[in-house]
Amino acid sequence: MNSREPSNDFDKELRIHLELEAEEQSGAGTSEREAKDRARRAFGNATIVAEDVRAIWHPRWLEDAWQDLLHGLRMLRKSRSFTAVAILTLGVAIGANTAIFSVVNAVLLRPLPYPDAGRLAIIWSGLGDANRAPASRFELFEIRERTREFDQIAGIWVTNGALPGEGEPEQVKVGVVTNNFLPLLCARPALGRFFAPEDDASHAPFGIMISHGVWVRRFGSDPKVVGHSVRFGQGSAVVLGVLPESFRLILPGHTNIPATVDVFYTVPIDAAEPGGPAFLHLIGRLHSGSNFTRAQAEADSIATQITSWDGNLAVSNFHLFVFPLQADDVRDVRATLLLLFGGVGFVLVIGCANVANLLLARATKRTRETTVRASLGASRGRLVRQFLTENLLLGLLGGFAGLGIGWSAMRAILAARPPSLLVFGPVNIDARVLLFTLGLTVLTSVVFGFAPILSAGRVDLTQNLKEMGRPAGRRMRRWTGVLVSCEVALGFALLCGTSLLMRTFVNILRVDPGFRPQNVLTFKIPPPSYGMLHQLQQNLAALPGVQSASAVSHLPLDDAANWYDYYWKEGTPTELQSTVMADHRSILPGYFRTIGATLVQGRDFVESDDATHEHVAIVDDVLAQQLWPGIGAIGQKLNISDSPKGPYQFQRDWVVVIGVVRHIQCHSLTAMVRPQIYVPFQLAPRPMAIVVHTSGPVEGLAESARKQVALLNKTIPVSHVAPLSENVSRARAESRFASLLAMSLSSVALILACIGIYGVLSYSVAQRTSEIGLRMAIGARRLDVMRLIAADSSASVLLGLAGGFLLSVGLTPFLKSLLFGVTPGNPANYVAIVFVILLVSAVSSSLPVRRAMKIDPLTALRHE
Amino acid sequence: MLILRTLLTGPTHGHAIAKHIQRTSDEMLQVEHGSLYPALHRLVKKGWISARWELSKERKREFKYYRLTPLGRKQLIRERSKWVQMANAIHRVLNSASGA
């Protein structure tokens, strides 16, 4: 029978052994007692042997570790200020990393919440200079016919629509989708069914799917609504199904598709109208055996086939681009996030350097303890393990603090995050973030613990006993100097990036968007009749405090679905006709005056510019300069897309240019995306945004504006009532976010560097008290003392500045895509940063230096 | 290795192993008996020998018997060949040195 506790039965084993041995010894005529003694002597030290046997089965390290832990706790409790500073430093550094990583995790690492998310692709079409454009129904049809790499290709376009239902009418986002779109992104509906191919048939009843939100809000979560007819737009529709609560559309930012779309209906895909409008954003799912390289190769060949298919399309350089959906989704925010992640890594290194410095100073103070323990027989490994345990303990406490700080920092980041980050799923501290924080904690404990362990590894007994109590000098100071240099260098690089981002933000604040965002109230309504719209314009303009009122189909810097199409001037050869695109906007007369845009040439629209008269348009100066440089645009003929027969009934049309307006920043404040073409509402009825220019603040106006709409037609829903200035601040949000976060990171870095320099100098002053005393006793002036101490830090600060400069020169080019109006290598920037760092180091060294200068030679020498 | 070699002749208990090693090495290895036990336990932990309390037939009392496991047997053969190789090598070196 194998005994379960081999170390416990050793006692029995020992007893038997001694008895046997004693028997043997007693055979030679000795007394029983003497025999026992001899047996015991032959055996050796039984206690040690028993302990050794025990150690074989119960490893000693566990016990040792427990002891080390208790000892470590005692040591940490003994020096409270050290512990507090170290834990706080680690907490801030680890916390900042946790917070940023939680965002990186949610946006870049977590897969999209769709079935087979890794196989989802977005397919952009490109014609001429536009390479991220939607596709037409015809193109989708052709791609579907030819593809072998995709098992599904679906399309979506989002517009506005009205959901009258019961009670207040509501304007909602409406998704026009192919019947296979929703099943591609959603495993199953919460209620009812998805669209089926039969729903596309012309005789099929008009069916819609609704979001969970609408189901709760408009239909009181009634499951019986499925299969029933509800009011939708001008008519009615049958609710086929309800989408799950968690369903969100996560598509690239400039598709202008919001995360929540409330109503979906289908658009049939057939080979009709080869020259039809391109409005569908295509999502495809690869076959399980395929990959993106093969899909792109296939797309290239399909594009060539479509190009050569028919001259009718006037397509000369049609392209298709296939990207992984997730990669395309994060395209705009990736750089910002990675940059912040890098920056926060710097903060972590600075924090580690700081704690290493503190530990070094403490290790020197503890030389006596180490030496005594070593001389009492503690092995070097045992001492190193003891230090490691203490550091790990410190690290874990820091990690805990970091988790707390990280959580609150994450909340703060969430509050400040720009819309481009909002579409991604929830940002939280999940298992992966926890694992990251834990890993970071262990890593930092090892890294910052490295220095003191090195010093403990080299315990020189006699030397230390001789110097008992006096800290070992020069070598340690060199170490701390190097650490300070590192901190300064990293702080320099962080400041450099931050200043560039802040200047970018300031430049963005200064951008003239081409209109005046102040004192303009906006709200949206579904496609109105011209008569009603005209009446509303007049009624609103008559309100007290209103200067003027007008309407536009697409507000500048708005997130609504865009309208853009090809244009060409008279005499353009067929193969060049569909090559350049412009944003198209439908407006009422007075729009430019109301939002403060500048008409540089020609005239505004008037009421009589309708379908029955000569078709006219206004273009922006970019387009005018492009098509008719030097000639002037007024009176020129332009081929555009409009829809005089009704909303979205697109047709090609020749119009005469009657005015030129200064370009309005429509998509971003920093980039000119496309030129603009304006047509009168009568030529292109659409859902409209009403703009009202007031003489004072716009806040009071919202209610009376709603009332004016209700007076004309009670069933028209009014939505998105907001000042126009909101659009502008939303457009600045990303830059504000990046510069805000960078600023917080550099502030933390600067404070940590301050603590670092302060700590090192205080330590050095404390260490050299007697030396300074001696120097003063033999005639050094206070100024000499100051020079002595300052020299200590300035060497490492200067070294750090040089290193930081090199680091910045190497790293700032990576920032380029985030900058606007500044160049990375700006010399003024560098000068400012050097100045800031010198100032900071001067401030943080002033206290220790002053302390050194106040040293009284008498006391200092007696101290010895 | 000495312990393994001792157990090759059959299972036995601690005291007997100590005596056996003492005898066969012509009293040259005078070790304290106590140092044997940690070594025994270490071998048990490695799985080279197994331990079990058994009634001795002649003495009518329980002893903890150690016996070689197949793993231990293999280990013994391996170590033994290593020893022999080394001894041979030393032997050759000594002989050639004396021959020169």
Image (cartoon, coloured by chain):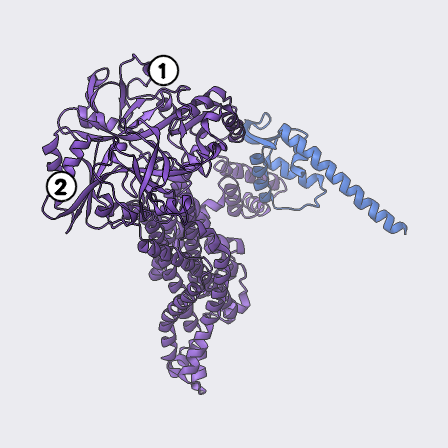
Chain colours: A purple, B blue
Please name whichever residue, A594 or A115, is drawn nearer the observer in this view of the structure. A594
Please name whichever residue, A65 or A610, is drawn nearer the observer in this view of the structure. A610
Quadrant into which the C terminus of chain A falls: bottom left
Q: Is residue A137 visible?
A: yes
Q: Is residue B1 above or below residue A856?
A: above
Find residue A448 and report its horizontal and vertical position in percent: 46, 55
Residue at 45% across, 27% down:
A313
Q: Is residue A49 above or below residue A827?
A: above
Subunit ID for the residue under disc 1: A
Q: Residue furthest bottom?
A: A779
- The residue that disc 2 covers is A540
Find residue A417 and report its horizontal and vertical position in percent: 31, 45
Q: Residues within 10 Å of mark 2 (few under 14, many from 20)?
A: many
Residue type at mark 2 is Leu
Find residue A831 and report its horizontal and vertical position in percent: 43, 67
Residue at 34% across, 58% down:
A84
Which quadrant of the structure image shows residue A123? top left
Q: Is residue A684 visible?
A: no
Which quadrant of the structure image shows residue A521? top left
Pointer 2 and pointer 1 on the same chain: yes
- The residue that disc 1 covers is A197
Please name whichever residue, A678 or A218, is drawn nearer the observer in this view of the structure. A678
Please, what secondary structure does the residue beneath circle 1 have? Answer: helix
Residue at 55% across, 65% down:
A460
Please name whichever residue, A316 or A462, is drawn nearer the observer in this view of the structure. A316
Question: Which disc number belongs to residue A80?
Answer: none
Residue type at mark 1 is Pro
Q: Is residue A94 above or below residue A164?
A: below
